[in-house]
Amino acid sequence: MKRKITCIMVLSVVASVICMTTLQQNAEARAGGSRSIGSRGTRSYSQPASPSSQPRPSQPIQQPSAPSPFQSPQPAGGGFLRSMAGGLAGGLLGGMLFRSLGFGGGGAGGGGGIGLFEIILLGGIAYLIYRMVMKRRQAAPAGQSGYNYVEPIPHQQPSQLQSAPPADVATGLAHIRQMDASFDEQRFTDSVMDLFFKIQGAWMNRDLAPVANLLTPQMHQIFQTDIDNLLREHKINRLENIAVRSVEIAEAWQEAGQDYITTLIYANLLDYTTNDSTGQVIEGSKTDPVKFEEYWTVTRPVGGNAWQLSAIDQKQG
């Protein structure tokens, strides 16, 4: 009897590890779904360069408005790989637990229970599933988020990304100023921060109309597809206490008559998903803030024109 209880405890722990690591990848549902999407022109196949290290401010810049019940759904996530791994692990767990309780016959000893080899096998399965989940979460490439977009998103797996060319931000900004003498770096970063808040607010409210002019057609399509899918799944993503700690210019360049600037945004927020009927928390936490760093790239026709969000990239490492 003691051995059966021990086996049940071991199986329970392994099952808990599998569940926690599997659900972890769906915890962050902010605009973009914590994945890389959109286009950076010819640099879409390069990982954005890191900006010069600067001391981050101790006091974050809070969202100007008080937290509101803005709502937005969370990508369904999952996919065939996770379902297959979960099903395999669940089948093994169920079968071994069934045998450990003395059912199913088989073997000279009757019930038999599970042995050291089976426990090691379960541990190995749990570790492999954990590695797969974490690798998918770190990569988060477009096209593997559970949605089918009309247009392909020009991003590759991190293993396929080329190193970005040495970034000469000063040269890039100088070229931009040649066609827009009024360009000011501080005003620009402030405008990116404002764009960030507005897009997150529209995403939470599930209404892109107020920010349609802040998104390229491709980004508008991606966000709208996400929202349509998530509305159908009756999920609400709640983002609260949004705080931007820094906005740094990482790259600046021109190509094909367009200005491009990639910024690294360091922020934190409460990010959790609820059922829109019951209000039950499905994913994320109402109390533990999520800290993240993302590259947001904006573009515009060369000159003093309005900027639009063209890409979001996840910071690697």
Image: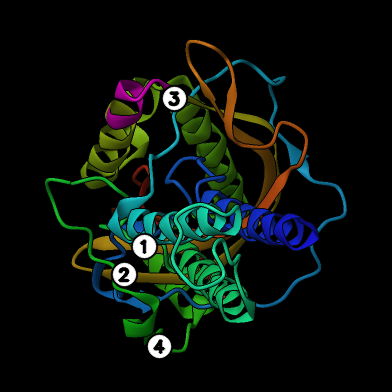
| Foreground residue among 257 and 214 | 214
Inter-mark Cα distance, 2 to 3: 40 Å
User: Marks 1/3: CA distance?
Assistant: 34 Å
228 is within the stretch colored magenta? no
Asked if the residues shown at circle 2 and circle 3 are in contact, with their CB atoms under 8 angstroms apart, the answer is: no
User: Circle 3 is placed at which residue position?
Assistant: 235
Label 4 neighbourhood size at 10 Å, few (<14), some (14-19), many (20+)? Answer: few
Q: Nearer the viewer, residue 233 or 179?
A: 233
For badge 1, the amino acid type reads: Tyr
In the drawing, does residue 215 fall left or right of residue 62?
left
Query: Label 2 belongs to which residue?
Result: 254
Q: What element carries label 2?
A: strand
Which residue is located at x 59 percent, y 20 percent?
280
Taking 152 as reference, is 165 above or below it? below
Crowd band around label 3 with a 10 angstrom C-alpha radius: few (<14), some (14–19), many (20+): many
Counting residues from the N terminus, which is met first, the one under dot 2 or under dot 1? 2
> In the rendered structure, which disc, 2 or 4, sits on the residue that comes first in sequence?
4
Mark closest to the chain's N terminus, 1 or 4: 4
As drawn, the label of residue 260 is 1
Amino acid of disc 4: Pro
